[in-house]
Image (spheres, grey):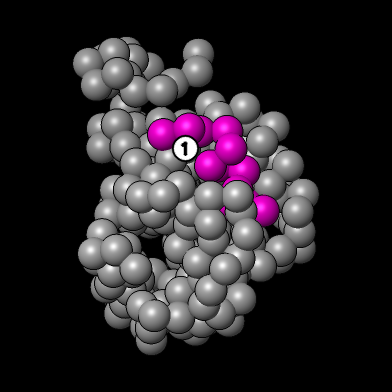
């Protein structure tokens, strides 16, 4: 095992515990994967708690997608694989069962093409448009097919009744982005039904242009 891989294993566990300790995913929910230097993957095991991960027991895949060591991986592997296959710059994928994002997905007035309302510039900068995908049974390979259907145009999706999934350049970036998604969902719920002031279309376009955000018209 290389020094870089050892450090990556430890980083995954530290970040996962931080998410768990702050209530962003509970019990044995959520999963993380990250690219290794040799093109393989490290993946959190199925049935594991983010609060008690063992760096030495993470699932290890080689560059050909074969499970070569560690405990069996999360059953959401088709979801992770879809992001790596369609977004070549993806270095990590994070999936949570964060409560505010799930709660927001239950409301009737969501836009499937743009799940989050335009409330803050940082959500737009970090997330772009978040696609709201329909309900799937946990572990259903159809989730991966739905992500592939987006043709790599979205770095973040929300699985209705389930939780958010984001792809980032590395595991720290992906964790930061999924926290931004959860924070924005919380703001949306706190202000839902109120006469809130959202960012205007002109303001959104200015953010998209200045920060070169992936944003379909």
In the image, farthest residue toward the front: 1
Front-lying residue, 32 or 99: 32
Front-lying residue, 196 or 39: 39
Tell me: 157 left or right of 123.
right
Main secondary structure found in the magenta portion: helix
Residue 142 in the image, given as x and y percentages of width and height: 77, 49
Residue 4 in the image, given as x and y percentages of width and height: 26, 59
Would you name the residue on which mark 1 appears?
155
Magenta part of the protein: which range?
Answer: 78-89
Q: Tell me which residue sits at (48%, 42%) in the image.
A: 156
Front-lying residue, 144 or 65: 65
Tell me: 192 left or right of 5.
right
Q: Tell me which residue sits at (52%, 77%) in the image.
A: 70
User: Of helix, strand and loop, which one carries label 1?
Assistant: loop
Whether residue 165 is visible here, answered yes or no, is: no
Q: Mark 1 packing: few (<14 Cα in 10 Å), some, or many (20+)? A: many
**Residue 92 drawn above or below residue 47:** above
Numbered label tally: 1
Tell me: 214 left or right of 133.
left
**Residue 60 drawn above or below residue 17:** above
Whether residue 47 is visible here, answered yes or no, is: yes
Residue 6 in the image, given as x and y percentages of width and height: 28, 69
**Residue 52 drawn above or below residue 136:** below
- The verdict on residue 88 being magenta is yes
Quadrant location of the N terminus in the rendered image: bottom left
Write down the quadrant of residue 9 in the picture.
Answer: bottom left
């Amino acid at each position: 095992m290389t020094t870089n891989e050892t450090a990556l294993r430890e980083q995954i566990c530290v970040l996962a515990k931080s998410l768990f300790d702050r209530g962003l995913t509970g019990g044995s929910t959520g999963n993380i994967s990250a690219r290794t230097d040799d093109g393989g993957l490290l993946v959190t095991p199925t049935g594991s708690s983010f609060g008690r991960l063992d760096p030495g027991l993470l699932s290890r895949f080689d560059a050909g997608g074969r499970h070569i060591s560690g405990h069996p991986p999360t059953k959401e592997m088709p979801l992770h694989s879809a992001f790596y296959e369609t977004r070549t710059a993806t270095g990590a994928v994070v999936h949570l069962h964060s409560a505010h994002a799930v709660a927001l997905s239950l409301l009737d007035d969501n836009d499937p093409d743009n799940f989050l309302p335009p409330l803050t510039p940082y959500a737009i900068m970090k997330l772009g448009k978040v696609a709201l995908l329909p309900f799937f049974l946990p572990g259903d390979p159809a989730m991966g097919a739905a992500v592939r259907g987006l043709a790599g145009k979205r770095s973040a999706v929300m699985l209705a009744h389930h939780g958010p999934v984001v792809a980032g350049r590395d595991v720290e970036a992906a964790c930061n982005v999924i926290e931004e998604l959860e924070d924005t969902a919380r703001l949306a719920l706190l202000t839902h039904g109120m006469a809130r002031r959202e960012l205007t279309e002109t303001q959104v376009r200015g953010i998209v242009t200045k920060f070169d955000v992936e944003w379909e018209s």
